[in-house]
Amino acid sequence: MKLVSGIRTSPSFNLAMEEYFLKEKAEEYFILWQNDRSIIVGRNQNTLAEINYDYVRNHQIPVVRRLTGGGAVFHDLGNINYTLIRRNARGTFHDYAAFSAPVIACLQELGVAATLSGRNDLLIDGKKFSGNAQCVWKDSVMHHGTLMFSSDLPELAEALKVNPLKIESKGIASVRSRVTNISAHLKQTMSVEAFLNYLLEHIPAYLPGTTRYIWTAEDQARIAELEAQKYATWEWNYGFKKEYSFQKEAYFPFGLVQVHMNVENNTIRELRIYGDFFGSADIAQLEDAFTGVRHEETAIEKKLQEIPLENYISGMKKAQLLELLL
C-alpha cells in the first residue's frame, strides 16, 4: 500500500489523478487530497439538475464529473478527500464499512463519534460529514469520500440548491442530508492543515505495510494529459448524453418570459417560449433557430449573436435570454 499526498488543488487534475492511479498503476493506494471550491457530480447524474447553475456561473465554481456513482458534493479547502484503491478486490465492492474503517478509526482516536450510516454516509450525531462512493475497474475497486472539516456550509447550500421546477432529469438525483463539519466536534481546536497531517501520520497504523509514495514528473504529465482530454471538458462534465426537459421563467419590465425545452444528447431538440411580451416577428422562428444547438453557454451565446432578438421579444437583451436558456 502506498500513501499518496495530493500535490494540487485543481478538481479536474485531482479527478484525473484518481483515474490514473486506478487504471495506469499496479499497486494499492491511499490518497489524501484537497480541491479548491468546486462541485463534483456523480458518474450517472445530470449536472444541470444537481447545481444552482446561475450561482455556480456567477461565482466561477468549477463543476467536474467523477468516475463513481452517487450524488453531487461540494468541495472546498475546508474539506479533505480520501481515496482507497484495492486490487483483486471485486468481491469487496459495496463493502463501505471495510473501506471507511481506517478513517473512522482515526476520527475516533480524536474523540469524534463517527459512524457509518445506511449505505455510504459517515455521520456525527446524526449529521453527515462524509459522502462515499465506489467504482470497479477490472479486478480493482476504488472507494473515495469527503471529510468535511471546516467547509463553507452556506456556500455548499447555495451551490447545490436547485429549483425543482427547473429541470426534469433522467439522471440519478442527489439526496440532500443535514451536514456538519468535523471541527465542530473536536475537543480541541485544530486547523484543516493539522488535520490533514494527522491523517497522514495515523492512517498507516490501519493499513499495514504502507509507505509514502514519491511523485514523478511522468505522473504529473500523464495526469495533466488525462485532465485536458477528459476532466476539463464540457462533454464529460456537463454533456454525457443525458436526456432531460428544461424550463425556466423570469419577469421583466416588458413582460413574463417562460422557456421550455427538450434536450437530447446534449443538443436542444425543441424550444418553446411563452409569455405576455410583445414582438413584431413570429416567436416560432426564434424557437426553431435553436434546434440543434448544444445546450451550453458558448454555443447558445454564439447563436444569439446571429438573431435580431428585439424583433421577437421587444425590450429583451440577449444576455437576459441567455440567462433563461441555461
Image (cartoon, grey):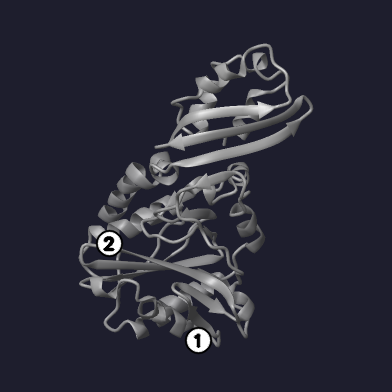
Q: Secondary structure at mark 2?
A: helix
Q: Residue at x 35, y 72 (%)?
A: 94
Q: Amino acid at mark 2?
A: Leu
Kindly identify which residue carries mark 1.
108
Is the residue marked by circle 1 packed among few (<14), some (14-19), or many (20+) residues within 10 Å?
A: few
Q: Residue at x 60, y 69 (%)?
A: 179
Whether residue 274 is visible to the viewer of this picture, yes or no, is yes
Marked residue nearer the N-terminal end (2 or 1):
2
Q: Quadrant of residue 271?
A: top right
Q: Quadrant of residue 21?
A: bottom left
Expressed as whole percent of the image width and height from the top left, the position of residue 200 reads 41, 76
Q: Secondary structure at mark 1?
A: helix
Kindly identify which residue carries mark 2.
22
**As drawn, is 242 to the left or to the right of 87?**
right
Compared to 76, does 238 lie above or below? Answer: above
Q: Are marks 2 and 1 in contact (CB under 8 Å)?
A: no
